[in-house]
Image: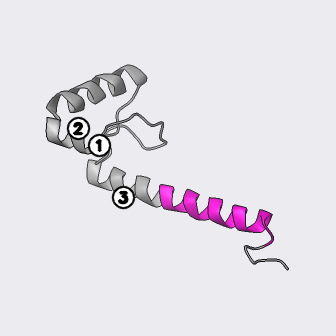
Amino acid sequence: MVEVVKGRQNAETTLKNFEAEQSSADRHEGWRYFLEKSTLKAGTNPAEATELRQAELESRETKATLDADASHGGGGSSR
């Protein structure tokens, strides 16, 4: 889930609040919160923000894969 807030100080406060509410079991399992710059507007619906962030991430990963394939001769093996 993503929460979009404006400003670094607000983001740090929100992050601390999330961490304070996180169960020790989740933390032990490796679930962590982090800050990330975004072009999303503060107050964006968290579910919508999560979907938009996931779509952006997938787009960046696809582009990186295509760029890597192109720089390696299309990904085919050479003999």
- Secondary element under disc 1, as helix, strand or loop, is loop
Label 1 sits on residue? 30
The image position of residue 8, as x and y in percent, is: 41, 23
Q: Is residue 23 visible?
A: no
The image position of residue 24, as x and y in percent, is: 15, 35
Label 3 sits on residue? 51
- Indicate whether 36 appears above or below 48: above
The image position of residue 30, as x and y in percent, is: 29, 43
Circles 2, 1 touching at the beta carbon (< 8 Å): yes
Location of residue 52 (image quadrant): bottom left
Given the image, on which type of amino acid does mark 2 rest? Arg
66 falls in the magenta region: yes
At horizontal 85% and vertical 80% (from top left) the residue drawn is 79
The image position of residue 42, as x and y in percent, is: 36, 37
- Indicate whether 79 appears above or below 49: below
Location of residue 48 (image quadrant): bottom left
- Secondary element under disc 3, as helix, strand or loop, is helix
Q: Residue 42 vs residue 39: left or right?
A: left
Residue stretch rendered in magenta on the structure: 57-73
At horizontal 34% and vertical 24% (from top left) the residue drawn is 12
Residue furthest right in the image? 79
Q: Residue 40 vs residue 26: left or right?
A: right
Q: Is residue 40 visible?
A: yes
- Indicate whether 31 appears above or below 11: below
Label 2 sits on residue? 27
Which of 78/43 is in front? 78
Q: CA distance from mark 2 to mark 3?
A: 23 Å
Given the image, on which type of amino acid does mark 3 rest? Glu
Q: CA distance from mark 1 to mark 3?
A: 22 Å
User: Mark 1, residues whose alpha carbon is within 10 Å: few (<14), some, or many (≥20)?
Assistant: few
Q: CA distance from mark 2 to mark 1?
A: 5 Å
